Image (cartoon, rainbow, N blue to C red):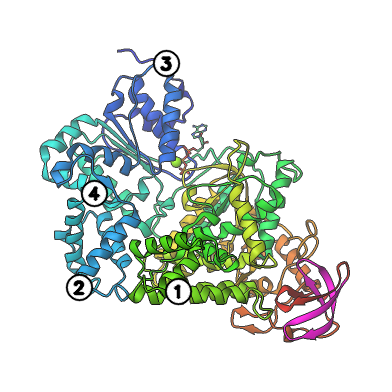
Amino acid sequence: MAARPAPYLDELNPAQRQAVETLDGPVLMLAGAGTGKTKALTARIVHLLNTGRARPNEILAVTFTNKAAREMKMRVGRMLGETVEGMPWLGTFHSICVKLLRRHAELVGLKSNFTILDTDDQLRLLKQLVQAAGIDDKRWPARQLASLIDGWKNRAITPDRVPTADASAYNHQAPKLYAEYQQRLKDLNAADFGDLLLHVVTIFQTHPDILQNYQRWFRYILVDEYQDTNVAQYLWLRLLAGGHRNICCVGDDDQSIYGWRGAEVGNILRFEKDFEGAHVVRLEQNYRSTPHILAAASGVIAGNKGRLGKTLWTEAEEGEKVRLIGHWDGEEEARWIGDEIEAMQSGSRGLRPMSLDDMAILVRASHQMRAFEDRFLTIGLPYKVIGGPRFYERMEIRDAMAYFRLVVSPSDDLAFERIVNTPKRGLGDKAQQTIQTVARANGVSLVDGAALAVEQGLIKGKGAKELGKLIVDLARWGRMTGDAGTSHMDLAEIVLDESGYTEMWQNDKTPEAPGRLENLKELVKALENFENLQGFLEHVSLVMDNETDDGGAKVSIMTLHAAKGLEFPAVFLPGWEDGLFPSQRSMDESGVKGLEEERRLAYVGITRAEEVCTISFAANRRVFGQWQSSLPSRFIDELPAEHVEVLTPPGLYGGGYGAAGMGGGVASGIEARVAEANVYNSPGWKRMQARVADRPVSQPRESKGSVIDITAASAFEMGERVFHQKFGYGVIIGIEGDKLEVAFEKAGTKKVVARFLVGADD
Ligand code: ATP
Ligand code: MG
């Protein structure tokens, strides 16, 4: 059959074309970011169809996210026009495995209509098993068991094959409980997420006839983002491709960022061993980014050892250098980025005007999103959060807010329902039903109904005791809202601590728990911008109301992990500080493994940018009302100076470009780590430093190690010039306890809390 014309081939360079036209046998496309791997993979699907080599359902293509699968489907459809009937099997490992497992469920003891458990269900089930085994789940949290089991499933380890090294885990009970859990899932006709792959691998391994059928059926296999496959996925691929070996994998070892979830970058390195005679294609031309951006990214990733190493070049015009800017604190960083986005929209930065859709903010940790979301809501800048809930929609934030709502208005029944048994207070469905009934019968709120139910002895035992305590606590916290000595930030912390909510997450051993605790800290931080709890709660209800998608252009906010494979004309990378990025955990580890993964994340971040890449950091972040100063990220040291332009930060809280200098934290940090040929030797940085020396805008005092406490009024003197976020500059004319009387230049004389002031020594 004669091939139809192939305009899609004309869009490719010779190396890509080779990868697309080498249809038989194993092909590995190993290349850096933006070299057109995904583009070539898509063209390969089209080519298979266009040349009549394969019918749509004989092609199996695996992507990393459902979003990527949708995009690939769209592109294939566009390239082919109306010429082909049906579509290839195109999806994530999980979505493809669900389909396969439904067909053969009975072989692993399930029915084809099995249900898929989410993580909550999974945990509930494990807790039951843990309790039934008489294990104290305070000491041995079920979540710990859950992550062990997930880890085994990622490595395709069934209960009978748990390695001896792991046998002592979870008080020596893990292998036994794993087996019981799998049995229980079967009884329930259910599978958890990890099972989807594990079961299919098991079926392939134990039923050669079935495997052979699929090997004949899926004649061509394609895999994107191969560097992030885990062992189970790798086995699955190797089994399926075992006959014909028509497998094409594309990836970049420098972009392997899911090691923490069991991905093995080794899979890409051993491809040539497993598939002997593999055709390896290297792509070196980058079509995405300007030379400055590319050079900056290459400079950073060069710090990793044991890379395959690759050269990247581009024909793009030189463009902008990577822009680097330091800020006094995180709020200022958010403010500056908001202003900058608006300026870039109108093209007033000497750059081409850009749509909001062209811009993205990529953060290391999801709690960083809060400052941006709040700021953008304040200035009415449309944004969307990709790959996760918005800050105020997260479970722990909603829980905490429910407590705050109850403190402010005890009759908030929805809030009460949400938290009455969170953390666990031994109040099951029956007890909660009793509370509802009593409240309704007496025409009172749930809190009052609960009090009556306890009084009348309708709820008994541990539940009654704990519920009684909650009711008394709520009333006490409510009274504290009027207490002048307790700020609403303090109160929020007290509520989260005394209710046991914070502790619940502290005892939680899942990988998500530290993130949730960070989010709670971030929530308390957000309170500082408001006069009281009530004002804050109103703000949040407005945030939640602002949900509707009008289809207009929006800035994207997402984590670096979620940004994999994507590209944007302008990218902001905030929070480049040691401890945040690289994360504290990766810095604390003894080996370099974690740090290298962080560095790959930095590489992924920079290489998302097409034209403008802006990296920023803050010298200080407020954590529970205390300033914590931090050093610029070590990855900033690794940016090659000739590709970086250091922007002068705006004056403290306001002012335009080049108005003032930096806080002391950064300046001292710089001295500690000046190295040859890094940005700290660049003229821009020197200019910034000179300004710091000229005009110390504010100096944190009373240094206690790295934590600087400036909350005490005793840190200030009569007659001293100070700055307040809301009221501006002024002079101290009175000191009473932790309150200061300040004559503000614009706002007149006011009493303010010391923690809101910083010195302004100019
Ligand atoms: P990543 O590693 O980030 O996933 P990638 O290697 O998959 O990157 P693609 O996303 O496929 O790269 O391509 C990057 C950009 O370059 C896209 O905008 C794509 O359209 C463009 N591109 C790729 N190949 C070519 C080419 N031969 N000519 C013109 N543009 C190209
Ligand atoms: Mg790609």
What's the CA distance linking mark 3 and mark 1?
67 Å
The picture quadrant where one finds residue 15 is: top left
Q: Give neighbour class at mark 1: few <14, some 14-19, many 20+ (Cα, 10 Å).
A: some
Q: Is residue 392 left or right of residue 693?
A: left
- Residue 500 numbered mark, or none: 1
What's the CA distance linking mark 4 and mark 1?
33 Å
Q: Is residue 708 visible?
A: yes
- Residue depicted at 37% across the width and 74% down the height: 457
Q: Is residue 15 visible?
A: no
Q: Is residue 293 left or right of residue 59?
A: right
Report the predominant secondary structure element of the magenta stretch: strand
The picture quadrant where one finds residue 87 is: top left
Q: Earlier in the sequence, mark 4 or mark 3?
A: 3
728 vs 214, nearest the viewer: 728
Three-letter residue code for mark 2: His
Mark 3 sits on what residue? 5
657 vs 166, nearest the viewer: 166
What's the CA distance linking mark 4 and mark 2?
26 Å
Residue contact between numbered discs 4 and 2, judged by CB atoms under 8 Å: no
Three-letter residue code for mark 3: Pro
Mark 2 sits on what residue? 172
Q: Earlier in the sequence, mark 4 or mark 2?
A: 2
572 vs 114, nearest the viewer: 114
Q: Nearer the viewer, mark 4 or mark 2?
A: 4
Mark 4 sits on what residue? 190
The secondary structure type at the circle numbered 2 is loop
Q: Nearer the viewer, mark 4 or mark 3?
A: 4
